[in-house]
Amino acid sequence: MKGKETVQNKKIPLFKKRDFQLLVGTVIFWAIFYTLTKFGMMNLYWMHIINVSLIYVILTTSLNLINGFSGQFSIGHMGFAAVGAYTSATLTTIVWNLPSHGVGPFSLFILSVILGGIAAAFIGFLIGLPTLRLRGDYLAIVTLAFGEIIRVTINSIKFVGGPRGIPGIPRFSSFTVIVIFTFLSVIVLRNIIYSSIGRALLSIREDEVASELVGVHTTYYKVLGFTVGAFFAGIGGALLAHLIQYINPLQFGFMATIYVLIMVYIGGVGSLSGSIVAAIGITFLSEGLRLGLDKLDQVTPFHVGPEWRMVIFSVLLVATMLYKTNGLMGDMEFKVLIPEEEDENAKHGA
Amino acid sequence: MGSIFNLQQIINGIQIGSIYALISIGYTLVYGIIQLINFAHGDFYMVGAYAAYFAVMFSAARKEHPNVLIVLLISMTAGAIVAFLSNRIAYRPLRYKPRLSALITAIGVSMFLEYTSSAIPAIGPSYRAFPQSALIPEHTYKIGHAILSNYQIVNVSVAVVLMVVLTYIVQYTRIGMAMRASAQDKDAARLMGIDIEYIIDFTFIIGGALAGAAGLLTGITYPRINPYMGIIPGLKAFIAAVLGGIGSVPGAMLGSYILGFSEVFGMAINSILGEGIAYAILILVLIFLPQGLLGKKTGEKV
């Protein structure tokens, strides 16, 4: 009891040491690659892969909030990314028809990304509300069906190009923009996880009936977590659209979701650090395999197609589940991602 | 628009419903016993279609006329073997782990089957024409304005015979009784001396065999197959199983025919409606009738 009082009386400094370290680390990371590209010492292709992997960090950490931290099972995450991507790309490309430089267009782009996130969150809320009241595995099937519904819907809307998609999206997602958005997403998700919302979600994951009995409004928190996850998926989708400058409905299909799902489960269920490492690692592994399989195709007499990449990933996924059910990092975090107050709580056994 | 409820639509509805029924029975049996949504089930159906394809091609290459029953047996066996192996390799080690890990593994197995098939040069990712006329020559009959082909007759009659056999096995044999007992209460069934793992193997084998048969029947009626053909029918068969009440075999059959009819009639009204009606049904069922038409309402166990 005495310990608890000291925790509450302790003054919280304006800049917490670890947040500062995280910020400095991100700035250094940004500065290194930014200078390398500025002086032409960095291959633009690998720079693109770094950008994509950072967007995957947003998608993976936000899916981990739903699947890992609250123990639900959504397999329609890229559907929300599609909503975000289409909302923001429709605004920037079709409605406003923005040029790709200038301060005005750029701020409109930022606005469109946020609106994309809000649209995805709204759809997530609509789907989550009826489904999350039911048993966990129904969410899987509804989110799977939702992915199909999104595809059918986008295909039938002429205004956004139907199956043809939206070409010629201005390239606003620079390395700097993506780093800032990724940093903010990870920080916000971390703060949610270590807040009362995060505790409620964890309790639901561990035992839904028990947490309901101690007064956690389970449906409320599940829908809240799901909506927040959808919001960040929308942000990720919007950034992706403005990075690759072309979107079509097929890009956000079931297989794209599976890719993010693999990152979550291999990285670690309930570990933001695991998701970050896995998102970056698997994006690079995937590109490496593409190059490696091409090489193998040239030296071996029989054809080795890029399809083997997905075979390897599926075997990796099944093997992870069989031998390390909670993923490579389990629920361990890098120390820099744990707020300092948590140490005190851990010490006092709270 | 004329009447959309004409004989032709009814024939098509029965035929599509029969295929859904064969697939959804496998879902419902497996879910009933181990509460696993087996995402790979649609791929067992794909394996059955390819097994039939290679069987027909093989006998055509030897200038023989393939026997329909033998081809049916081959595709059922292929489906059963793949189902058995995926249970033994991927699902069985996770039996007492959290349920979600088995679900993720099921997705992994599904991906593995799809991508391995499309990566193997002999199968490949592109569409192939199923040699249905080498198996059975086509005849069409006119009934009023409706056209009925013998493919549809084969399709529906094979499905009905298989469903009757399945119902007999589940309701009137010792192993069927053991299956029902395991679905009711696994632990009590084990205490009564039932070998649960054997029953689960058997369930996967039956489910896989029915899905394999559905693969052959689809190959006969819609002669285009590819490694990803199982995804959408698998999803729709699952929706049918949820509609009928997951865990209930008559429910799965009823749900499949309802879904088949609604798709056909929806498609006759508007193609987008036809494509989306299954998902609309799913959402409505989950909101208003989560236990399904014939399912039992279960409280949450604490």
Image (spheres, rainbow, N blue to C red):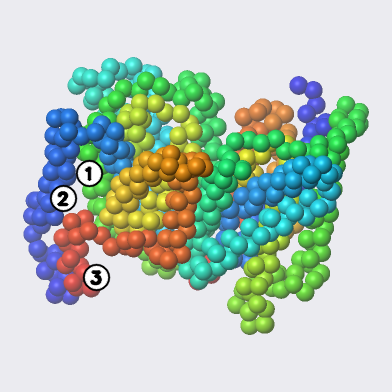
* Residue B247 x, y percent position in the rendering: 66, 60
* Residue A285 x, y percent position in the rendering: 35, 47
Marks 3/1: CA distance?
29 Å
Mark closer to the chain start, 2 or 1: 2
Say which quarter of the image contains residue A45: top left
Which residue in the protein does label 2 denote? A22
In the drawing, what numbered circle is on residue A183?
Answer: 1
The N terminus of chain B lies in which quarter of the figure? Answer: top right
Image position of A14 with respect to A42: above or below: below
CB contact under 8 Å: marks 2 and 1: yes
Closer to viewer: mark 3 or mark 1: 1
Which residue in the protein does label 3 denote? A350
From this viewpoint, is residue B280 visible? yes
Which residue is pictured at 52% across the width and 42% down the height?
Answer: A302
Closer to viewer: mark 3 or mark 2: 2
Say which quarter of the image contains residue B219: top right
